[in-house]
Amino acid sequence: MTLFTKHIKAGILLISLGFTSVSLAHEVGLQMYSLRNHFAEDPAKTLDQIQDWGIETVEGGRDLYGFTVEEMRSELDKHDISIVSTDTSFDEVRDNPMAAVYRAKFYGARFTTVYWIPHEGTFDIEDAKAAVDVFNKAGKLLAEHGVTLQYHAHSYEFLPHENETIFDYMIQNVTEAQFQMDVFWFKTGGMEPVSFLKKYPGRFTSLHLKDRRHGTPNKLDQKGYSDANVVLGKGDTGIAEVVAEAKKQGIKYFFIEDESDRVLKQVPLSIEYLKSLEKY
């Protein structure tokens, strides 16, 4: 049990869409990409930092920062850190999904996550339809090997489509995979994260908790936005409300991601904020 895990009642179980029974508990982890620059300089020291923060669950495993894959797994084990979700790519799950299976199984990961759908110009419904086919085919194969495929949306999926959005089309038609909500990018796409959680209960199986500086404009691309990352609870994404609704739905994994150059200062404060919400 991590120091961030809170058991509501021993033995209480939740059935959520796409999963078997899981305990009503949640964990706060870290997307390793947050420390990409630090990993590039000194990967072992960076793992020390994650351990010092008390974090035991992370996302990553695709970028090795000079380690071999065996060395990365060994270093994670030494630091008592587990990869819960491995990173993959759209091209990989489309063209070689077994590679994503092998990576996830090697690390003992429960999930593997696609973070971007390559597209030229504006992401449109035809791009979405092609992606739905890929996610359904790859998601089925991954599930057969005990791994859940997640898609992590950014803001480009929120253009209108038939009185909703392209993302609505995707979540309604992807049947063999699940979704990860990045609250920063939902907000930047003009959406309200809590409303989407309520609209699609059981479809979001993990969260990226990342807050956005007040006054940041919405837009449908990601250029130049890393500096808008602020300490959780200090921005406009409604972190407290998101966490409360996610807990009601039994979402287990809350991953902090901080893409700013203030990450070493901000992550500990974000952890303290999350602990203050209900004493993780």
Image: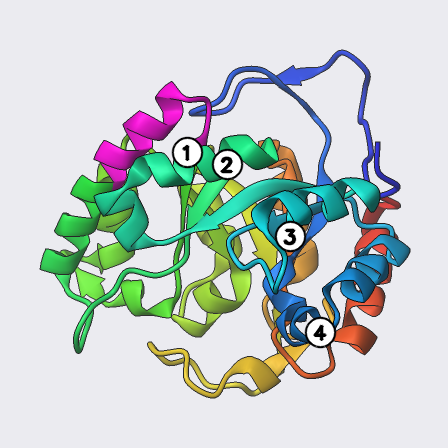
Above or below 94: residue 89: below
Nearer to us of marks 4 and 3 is 4
Mark 4 touches mark 1? (CB < 8 Å): no
Residue type, label 4: His
What residue appears at the point 64 percent right and 80 percent down from the top-left corner?
260
Give the residues drawn in magenta, as a range: 135-148
Q: Where does the C terminus fall, quadrant-wise?
A: top right
What residue appears at the point 17 percent right and 74 percent down from the top-left corner?
120
Alpha carbon of mark 4 to alpha carbon of mark 3: how far? 18 Å
Mark 2 touches mark 1? (CB < 8 Å): yes
Which residue lies under the disc numbered 3?
255
Residue type, label 2: Ala
Residue type, label 3: Phe
Above or below 24: residue 222: below
Q: Which SS class for mark 2?
A: helix
Please tell me in which quadrant of the rendered image residue 233 appears: bottom right
What residue appears at the point 64 percent right and 68 percent down from the top-left corner?
34
Alpha carbon of mark 2 to alpha carbon of mark 1: how far? 5 Å
The mark total stands at 4
Which residue lies under the disc numbered 2?
104
Which secondary structure type mostly characterizes the magenta part of the structure?
Answer: helix
Nearer to us of marks 3 and 2 is 2
Which residue lies under the disc numbered 1?
101
Residue type, label 1: Val
Which residue lies under the disc numbered 4?
38
Residue 220, image x and y in percent? 33, 76
Residue 24, image x and y in percent? 70, 26
Residue 96, image x and y in percent? 27, 42
* Outermost top residue: 11
Q: Which SS class for mark 4?
A: helix
Question: Magenta stretch: residue 239 in it?
Answer: no
* Label 4 neighbour load within 10 Å: few <14, some 14-19, many 20+: some
